[in-house]
Image: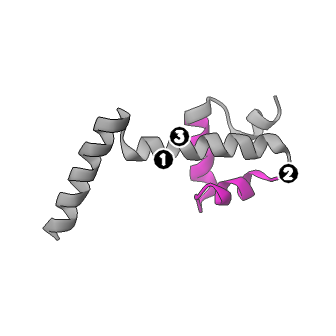
């Protein structure tokens, strides 16, 4: 439906204008920062953190985490 696509395009333009980044990049960054906090507590396993920050696929979460942080969640915890 065109109305939905139009609204989506408007939202994306406004979001980028205010944050200087796309919504997906912003959301991913927010989730990864929260994942780092949760992992550093030592209270949760990687797959728990994965679900807690909104990902259902642990493999995908690990890939995004490594792309964002530069190391896997396990390596991050082991520092």
Disc number placed over residue 29 in the picture, else none: 3
Tell whether label 1 touches label 2 (CB within 8 Å).
Answer: no
> Visible in this render: residue 63?
no
Start and end of the magenta stretch? Answer: 43-67
- Mark 1, secondary structure of its residue: helix
Quarter of image, res 50:
bottom right
In what element is the residue under mark 2?
loop
Dot 2 or dot 3: first in sequence order is 3
* Number of other residues with Cα within 10 Å of mark 1, as a class: few under 14, some 14 to 19, many 20 or more: few
Location of residue 35 by image quarter: top right
Residue at the outermost front position? 18
Does label 2 or label 1 sit earlier along the sequence?
1
Using the numbered discs, state the Cα–Cα distance from disc 2 to disc 3 in whole angstroms: 22 Å
Single out the residue that lies furthest toward the right.
43
- Which numbered tag is attached to residue 39? none
| Circles 1, 3 touching at the beta carbon (< 8 Å) | yes
Mark 2 neighbour density, 10 Å: few (under 14) some (14–19) many (20 or more): few
Horizontal side of 14 relative to 50 (left or right) equals left
Residue beneath the point at 56% across and 34% down: 68
Q: Residue at x 74, y 51 (%)?
A: 46
- Give the residue at the far left of this rendering: 2
Q: Label 1 belongs to which residue? A: 27
Residue holding disc 2: 43
The quadrant of the rendering that contains the N terminus is bottom left
């Amino acid at each position: 439906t065109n109305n939905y696509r139009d609204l989506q395009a408007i939202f994306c333009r406004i979001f980028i204008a205010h944050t200087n980044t796309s919504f997906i990049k912003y959301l991913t960054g927010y989730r990864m920062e929260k994942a780092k906090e949760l992992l550093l507590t030592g209270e949760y396993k990687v797959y728990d953190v994965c679900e807690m920050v909104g990902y259902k696929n642990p493999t995908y979460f690990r890939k995004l985490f490594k792309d964002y942080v530069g190391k896997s969640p396990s390596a991050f915890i082991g520092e």
